[in-house]
Image: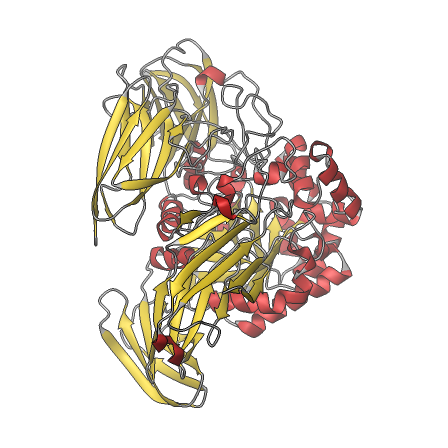
Amino acid sequence: MRKESFNKDWICYQTGKTETAFTVSVPHDAMLLDKKGDNSVGGVNNGWIEAEDYTYEKTFVVPEKWRELETVFYFEGVYHKATIYLNGEKVCRHDYGYTGFFVNVSGKLRYGEDNTLTVEAVNRDQPNSRWYSGTGIYRPVWLYLLPKQHICLQGIRITTLDYRKPEIRVHVKTTGSGKVKAEIMEYRSREVLWSAEGETDGKFQRDMVLEGAKCWDEEHPNLYTCRVSYGEDVQEEHFGIRMIGCDTENGFTINGKRVIIRGACIHHDNGVLGACAYDFAEYRKIRILKENGYNAVRSAHNPCSEAMLRACDELGMLMMDEYVDVWYIHKTKNDYATEVEAHYKEDLKTIVDKDYNHPSVVLYSTGNEVSETAQKRGIKLCGELTERLHELDGTRPVTCGINIFFNFLSSMGFGVYSDKKAEQEVRNVKKKKAVGSEFFNTLAGLMGSEFMKSGATLYPCDVKTRDAFAAMDVAGYNYGIKRYEHDLKKYPKRLILGSETFCSDAYKFWEIAKKNPRIIGDFVWSGMDYLGEVGIGSWEYKDYAPDFSHGKGWVSAGSGRIDLTGRPLAEMTYTKVAFELENIGIGVIPVPYAKQKHSPSAWKMTNAVESWSWRGCAGKETQVEVYARADHVSLFVNGKCVGTKKPEGDCRVIFKTVYQDGSVKAVAYDAKDCVIAEKELKTAGRETVLTVKPEQKCINREDLCYVRLQYTDREGTVKPLMRGDITVHVDGGRLLGLGSACPYYEKSYLGNVTDTYYGEALAVIKPDGEGRICVTAESKHVNGRAEIEVVSIC
């Protein structure tokens, strides 16, 4: 088998406007090109974008020798309602925007001639998503050339039978009979370590003991490659040796060892790159989350990319892959709700075929906040979805994220979709009535997180969720932490997963989970900020957001513990302390705004910044937060103790103090007054430098280069009060995306000018080839420059 990238030399144009065509490589997100408007029907969901439909075309020569081969295209993701044409003939239609699909064009090609592949992607049918979706071919495209007798695509499965021996089962599907050989190779060196062979009549299966092999887990992500030969066809699959356990006695286990899931919910976009699923961007996202203490991600609320799965496998990040955001009740007028019941069997097969050999995938989720689970029809569907996944893959447990309080409210008619509400939304987006998760999010923003969590403890919430929870392996609680201890007693066979939680509950969750194996883990909303659902998790001030209406100009949720550029926030430090991964941290409420009103959100615990560089603010009152697991904590400003406090039921203590240039220091003590840990922040020096800081000094030619643009002092300490547009010029590469982490951002990420947010911005560059990339940044304050080496193998 030959597998070739089919990503270059496409043309793209707004559907029906061929005169606007331009050359692109995929992954490509055409939605970044669309204008924004106050009357966009997508509204807060997509960031006020007036989405258009786009067409992609690629012309290529088909050699005569392809006549003897099976020719298949694989699209990893097209958003959405993709129609594929070959030389003007329709060859495929695929509605769901988050699952891959194969297009077999054997016999339909013009051999020895030019052929044109056309992809039409729909996105004018707004609203169709609760978040920024992107438009077009946003994931890679592959060309497969196979001999007539071949291994079926996605036809190799490797299952761990015993992690102690260890022993695996290799199962292979072929298009005919003959000899099959399976070889197990070391992942990096590709040295063949074990092999087995035999005959196939369309199916081949061998159990293999891999003596001396290393197991895979989140701390030791050891991988192997299975190479299968059948006639002229050779295909490979990477895998890890690991077995999942999930039971009431031991909780969630990997290879017999209990693992508490420290998870983060993430959306599929890559910030300033839009929805483009570049391999490097997906890897970087997982790397940053892993470095900051998470051991799991939830792909919310759709199946993740294959690049993300490879990253999770290599880095030891657990994955909960999620099917969909809706079942049969709409959350937006044109979402996937009309298709789920008719297509879930094939959709789930597509997900399992993609996921099966990836050791990182440890859970499936059938949906998110589907209030259908409060109805008999929905409870039945819940069981059918679980059963279908068990049929396809008996090795992984199944859950579904249920918003407990919302199930009760929806059963009384609150926040439920109707065609009348949808039509009102189209006629006047600013007077629309929020439904589904958007309704609940709006309510939470007004009433606060405690309202949501306390609401979940009401008896009717139990009644409206218990049957659905019984129809899955693990009960997925969205914002139900106040039910944990009660439900552990009432339902002794129930396993509980915090499928969506608040950052502020990290400490409480961890303390409960350590004592109760049936609390298997937690997924915070959200790990990294994302585009769309604008302002839902943002505490923003007037200097950065002229109004708090979440209208045009708002682009992101502001909801991450890590911001849109990949920078960890003080909330992330709090989380690491709560999970006992760090000893101490400090966060400071931005001093100039400490007494100002900010935009509301239930998803924000704090907007503290890890900085003591607020020159010009001497004498102003502010709030300093210290995160520590200690008997007591003292805070010092310029060496003087300004207070000592004991943490109460949390690892967060708050001090009111007055800012002075110099330093702030926190010291944590045990009960004997011995120092456990200390942390100090210092004020940046007076001189300002525009630091152009590549995340990597050397990159491979197929990678991306992420470059941080920061106003700092000579020592590199960021100055959050320095602000001003930065113009970026690149030689030796192409600027793919440029912007700041601010949830309110009026500029385009496709431009070469960006504002800064608390002193920082980010540029993402694609190298032209081997050599050097030179990045120059200019501002009215100061200029900066950096070079990055590009090589074939770094």
The residue at 69%/32% (across/down) is 430
Q: Position of residue 268 (x, y in %)?
A: 49, 49
Q: Nearer the viewer, residue 709 or 662?
A: 709
Q: Quadrant of residue 785?
A: top left
Q: Is residue 392 above or below residue 37?
A: below
Q: Can residue 236 be seen at all in this image of the molecule? A: no
Q: Nearer the viewer, residue 745 or 572?
A: 745
Q: Is residue 56 above or below residue 503?
A: below
Q: Position of residue 252 (x, y in %)?
A: 49, 61
Q: Nearer the viewer, residue 708 or 449?
A: 708
Q: Position of residue 516 (x, y in %)?
A: 53, 54
Q: Is residue 550 above or below residue 323?
A: above
Q: Nearer the viewer, residue 482 or 437?
A: 437
- The colour scheme applied to this rendered structure is secondary structure
Q: Is residue 9 left or right of residue 395?
A: left
Q: Position of residue 766 (x, y in %)?
A: 32, 44
The residue at 46%/33% (across/down) is 748
Q: Can residue 490 be seen at all in this image of the molecule? A: yes
Q: Quadrant of residue 728?
A: top left
